Amino acid sequence: MSEVDNNSTLPEPFVRVLLANQGTLYAYIVSLLGDPSLAEEVLQETNVVLCRQADQFPEIKDFSAWACRIAYYEVLSYRKRRQRDRHTFDDELLGLIANQAAPRVQEFDQRQTALTECLGRLSQTQREIIIQRYAPNGSVQKIAEKHGRSPGAISQSLYRIRDLLLRCMRDRLAVAE
Amino acid sequence: MDHMTDVQRVKKLLSQQADERLSDAQWDELVGLVSRSEEARDVYIEFMLLHAMMHRLTHLPASVASLAGSVKQDDDCPSLLSGDSGKSARSPILGFLGDAFAAGTKFFSRPTVLTLGLAIGLPALLVLMLVVGVTHRAGPDPGPVAQSPPAVEAAVVLRSYQCVWADGEAGIAAGSSLAPGHRIQLRKGLVEIGFLDGATVVLEGPATFDTQDGKEGFLHAGSLVANVPKGAEGFSIGTPATTVVDLGTEFGIRVDEEKGTAEVQVFQGAVELRASKVDKPDGPAEPAAERLTAGRAVRVELTVEKDAPLVVKPITPVAERFVRQMPSEASKPAIVADFSGGSGIDEVDQFAGKVGNGWASDWRVTQFGGCDNTYSIENSNPLREGGNYLKILGVRTTDAEVTGGILSRTVVTPKSSIDYGKPRPYFVVASDPYIVTFDLRVDDLGQFDRDFDTITISMGGKPGRYTNPNTCWAVRVAGGLDSETGILGRHWKFHDGDGKGGYREVDSGVTMEEGRVYNFRILVDPPKKCWTPSISVDGGPAKTFKPQGIRSRLGAEEGAPAPFFLLQWHMKGGNKGKDLERIGFSLDSIRIDAAKLDSSKK
C-alpha cells in the first residue's frame, strides 16, 4: 500500500487519461456486472482507487489495461459485499469474461460512433422503443402501456432491435478495420 | 446445437436479462451457454457494451433535462423563449424526452433558469437529435457542435468538504467524474473540481454550477474561486450577467441568484469580462468588454436587452468573501450515521443504508439462534438530537445462554476496497486520532440481572464479536455483579487494554438505567495507544475519565483491514420457567470525527 499525501493534488496528465478512459472503464464494468446502474457505483469506487494510486501513473505503460485490472478487483469486491444479488456469475466464469472483455472495450470510441450511425438506421418506432427503454425509469411495462401492446410483445421488439443494432455495429466496425 | 442457434439464444436471453425478465432457469441456461463457448462470451460482451452505451446515451446531463422541460412548458410560458428557439415544433422524440425528464423540471420553471437551461442544454440536445435522426431543430444552427461526440467527461471532483446536496441528489465524492453539462447543486460545504484543461475551481455552497466542458463552467448561483495554471489560459466561467475569461490567474465570482448580478474579484493575474453567452450559447466569442487586473473587484449587472453593453461598477475588493483553498487535513468531514433517510438501501444514511461518506459497508446485523431481533426506524420519543433513530428489540426464545445479536458497520481504511481519494476526504481511523460520539438509550431492560446479560459498544479491527482481540476500545454494561472485578451490575465499564489484545475492566461508576439517554464521547489516539471516554446522561454535563489503554492499535501495519463500529447484546440463560427474556434499546447520532492532537505523533 502506498501512503497518500493528503495535501497534494492529482497530476494533470493522470486526470486527463483517467477522464479519457471513463467510457472504456464503464463499459468494462458493465460487461462484468451486467447492470449499468450498479456499474456506475463500481466505476466511482474504481476511480477513487485509481486516484489513490495516481503516484504509480508515470510507471504505467498501458493505462487502460491497468485501470481495467483495478476495476476487475473492484467488481470482485463489490460482488462479495452484495452476495444477495440473484444473477451473478461465479468467479471462474467472471475471470474468463474479464480477460476476454479487456481488449474489446478498447474499441469503445469506435463502437460509440458505430452505435450513433446504427441508431439512425432504425425506424422511428424502433428508435422510440429502445430509447424509452433506456431512459431514466424506463421499463418494458411502461413502454407496453404507452404503445398499447403487451409486455411480451415489447420484450420481443427490444430483442429484435438490439439484434439489429449488434449486427449493424459489427458490420460497421468490420468496415472500419 | 449449431453456433448460430447458440448465438441467437444468448442474445435472446441477454435481452430478457437486460429488461429484468429473466427467470432463474433461463439464467442457468445463459450461464451454461456462456461458460461453454468463447463465441457465446463474445456475444455476451458485445451485448453488454451496447447495453452500457445505450444507458450512457440516454442518461443525459441535467442541462438537457432543462431543455426538455422548457419544451414541455412551451405552451404555458411562450414569452420566456426568445426567437425561433421557443417556437420550434415538438418532435415525437423530443416530446418523449420531455416526458422522461419531466420529474426534474420544477427548478427549471423559473424564468431565468429556464432561459439559461435552454442555452446551456442546446449543444448536448443537438448531439442527441443527431443520434436519433430528428430533423426538427429547437435552436439556432448547431454548426460544428453537432459533430461533437457525446459523453466526454469534462472534470473530476478532487475533494469535497462537509457537503450537503440538494434533495434528490445522490451527491458526489472525490474521484467522481463529471460529464459536460453535469449540474452540481450544493446546499452547503465545499467542492474542489479539476477541469480537463488543468484549471481548478473551489465551489462554495449554496451554489448551482454546471461543468460545460473541459475548459468552461457556468455558475448559476453562489460563489467560486478559479485557479488557472499556466497553459490553461482561456478557461472561462459563465454567469447570467457576464462571462469571465481567464488570462492565467486566480479569481473569484459570486452570483446573486435573485438579481442575476455577478461580483468578480481578481486575486492574481487578469481576466476579461465579456457579454454573457446565455442568449448565444454557440455563437462566436464575444469581444472583451472590460479587463480586470489583480486587486480589483467589480459588480456586473444583469442586462435584459439583447446586445446591451455590460454594466460594470467597481466595488471594494474583500478577499475574505471567498474561500480560496479547501480546509486543511485537520478539518476532515465526519463519518456520520443518524438514520436521517429512514429505512432503505438507496442512501448512505438509511438503515441498512449503503457504502459511502466514509462508511465502507451498510449496517450489518448478525442473527444468532435463540433470539428474535427486530430493527425499526422511529421518530417519536427521539433521543437527544431528535429526528429518526434506530430501535432494536431482542427477545430470547430459548432457555440457553445466547448472543442476542450484533449490529455493525465498517469504516473506510487505506486497505479497504472503498478507499480514499487523493487527497483523501476522510482521516485514517486506523492510525489518526479520532473522536466517536453516539447516543444510546435502553428502552426495555427485561431482567438484565446477571453477569452475562450485557450490552457492548466497541470498535475493532476485524469483523467479529467484541471479544475479538483486535478490538480497539469497548464500553460495556452487565446486569449482575462481576465477581472477579467487583464491578456492580448495571454500571458502565471500560476495557483498559494492554495494546496486545488483553484488557482489564474499569468501573465508570455511572449506572445504566432504563429510559435514560447516554451520550458517549470516545477520543481514540492510536499513535499513543490510548482512548479517553466521556459520558453524559440525559444531556447533563459530561464526565470525562482517565485515558484507557487500547486493546489493539487497530493500525494498518498490524493488519487491521476494516475498523467497524459494533453494538452487541448478550443474554444469560438458565431462567427456565420465567418469562422470555428481552432487551430493547435505541441508537442514534453516531459520528466519527478526526481529532487534532498536538501531542500525537503523525
Image (cartoon, coloured by chain):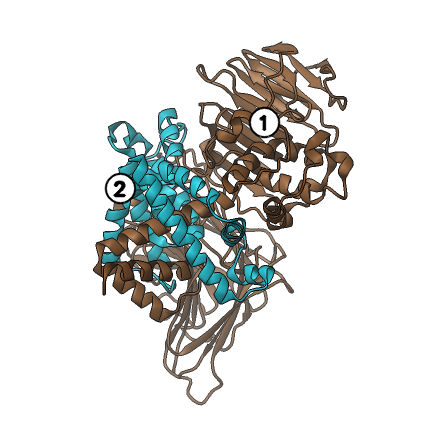
Chain colours: A cyan, B brown
Disc 2 crowd rating (10 Å Cα; few below 14, some 14-19, many 20+) is some
Q: Quadrant of residue B236?
A: top right
**What chain does mark 1 sit on?**
B
Q: Amino acid at mark 2?
A: Pro
- Coordinates of residue B133 in the picture (x, y in percent): 53, 40
**Disc 1 residue type?**
Leu
- What residue is shown with label 1? B224
Is residue A97 placed above or below B272 in the rendered structure?
below
Q: Confirm or deny contact between disc 2 and disc 1 (CB under 8 A).
A: no
Dot 2: element:
helix
Mark 1 secondary-structure assignment: strand
Q: Which residue is mark 2?
A: A103
| Residue B512 image offset from top left, x and y in percent | 52, 65
Viewed as shown, does residue A170 lie left or right of B336? left
The structure residue drawn at horizontal position 48% and vertical position 66%, both measured from the top left corner, is: A152
Rendered residue at 67%/21% (across/down): B263
Label 2 and label 1: CA atoms lie apart by 41 Å
- Residue B522: x, y in percent? 46, 50
